[in-house]
Amino acid sequence: MLPESYANGTSDSLADRVDRAIDDFPSYADEEHFEAQGAVFIRNRSIPDKYDANRVEQVTASTPQEIARLSERIEVEFKGYRHRYFYVDRDTPVEFEAWLLMEGYQRTDSLVMVLTDDLRGTPKPCEIRLVETDADWQAYCDLIFLADREFDSSPPRQTDNRDASEAQAQRIAALQSVSPPVRYWMAYAEGAPRAFFSSWISSEGIAVLDFLYTHPDYRRRGLATALVHHCVADSRSRGAGPVALETDPSDTPKNMYATMGFRPLSLSHEYLKTFE
């Protein structure tokens, strides 16, 4: 069991700490990260069509004048980009979120869940390895590209073999630039990596689990459950208390997390507008 102070903390204070932990993800290589006009800008010029790599978050602008100034700055910083993307959490002023809706942005919800007690259940035996070698990174990146093709709403980019190789090298370099503190894991089946997950611990001792994916041909075999158990155990062994993650509230993984002991804590939203 965890210390009583974790379990008995107020929902609001825990939600605040979890929001800060999620916001505090390390910056990738080639990622620009700066504050301007009451918001934080994240930009990666090497992958301009990747929505979550080019976004605005932690917005504090709330008055019409502040929102107008922020809007003007966004158009300057993302000139030539084919999208505008905002991450909105509990601290975002409702006035700004209302402005996004008035401007025709499309909203996607994420359910924030947290584990403050022991993880429930027993996973099936499964080989799980930390991504470390060059071959590991290649395999991890191959699975990421498979996940991108299945789920990513970013427009596909036309690439030849040389461009694809460069894109893979850039993605691997970005992942390695934050590892550690981010730890990347793969689960193996039939001698090859078939699923992945990542984990890291915030400065406040909250573990954040991110981007769980299983190859379509290897789902419902317990790989995802084993990865969750492994990442929670590893994070707790390194001093983490609460463990947080985000999931799609309209999809089934939230039920798996609830069965394992995660509880719903808050909602976050992403707002997107694309241009031809």
Image (cartoon, rainbow, N blue to C red):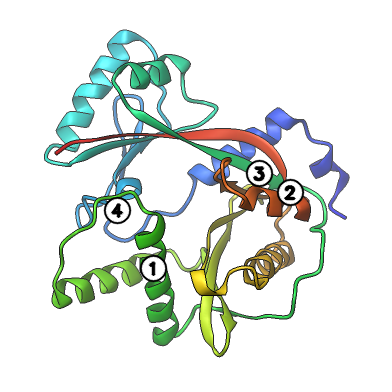
Please say if 151 is above or below 72: below
The image position of residue 202, as x and y in percent, is: 58, 51
Q: CA distance from mark 1 to mark 2?
A: 27 Å
Residue beneath disc 2: 258
Dot 1, how many residues are within 10 Å of its Cα: few (below 14), some (14-19), or many (20+)? some
Q: Which residue corresponds to mark 1?
A: 146
Disc 2 marks a residue whose amino acid type is: Ala
Left or right of residue 230: residue 215: left
Q: Earlier in the sequence, mark 3 or mark 2?
A: 3
**Rendered view: 43 above or below 95:** below
Camera-nearest residue between 69 and 152: 152
244 horizontally vs 3: left or right: left
Measuring from the top left, give residue 245's x and y in whole percent.
60, 49
Numbered disc 3: secondary structure: strand
State the residue position of label 3. Answer: 113
Give the mark toward the camera: 1 or 4.
1
Question: Mark 3 touching mark 2, by CB under 8 A?
Answer: yes
Mark 3 and mark 2: Cα distance apart in space = 8 Å
In this rendering, the label closer to the viewer, 3 or 1? 1
Mark 4 neighbour class, 10 Å CA radius: few under 14, some 14 to 19, many 20 or more: some
Task: Name the residue at 82% across, 59% down.
Answer: 120
Q: Disc 3 or 4, which lies upstream in sequence?
A: 4
Quadrant of res 266 = top right
Q: Amino acid at mark 1?
A: Leu
CA separation in Å, label 1 and label 4: 23 Å
Does the rendering let one see residue 184?
no
Look at discs 3 and 2 and give the one toward the viewer: 2
Residue with the mark numbered 4: 31
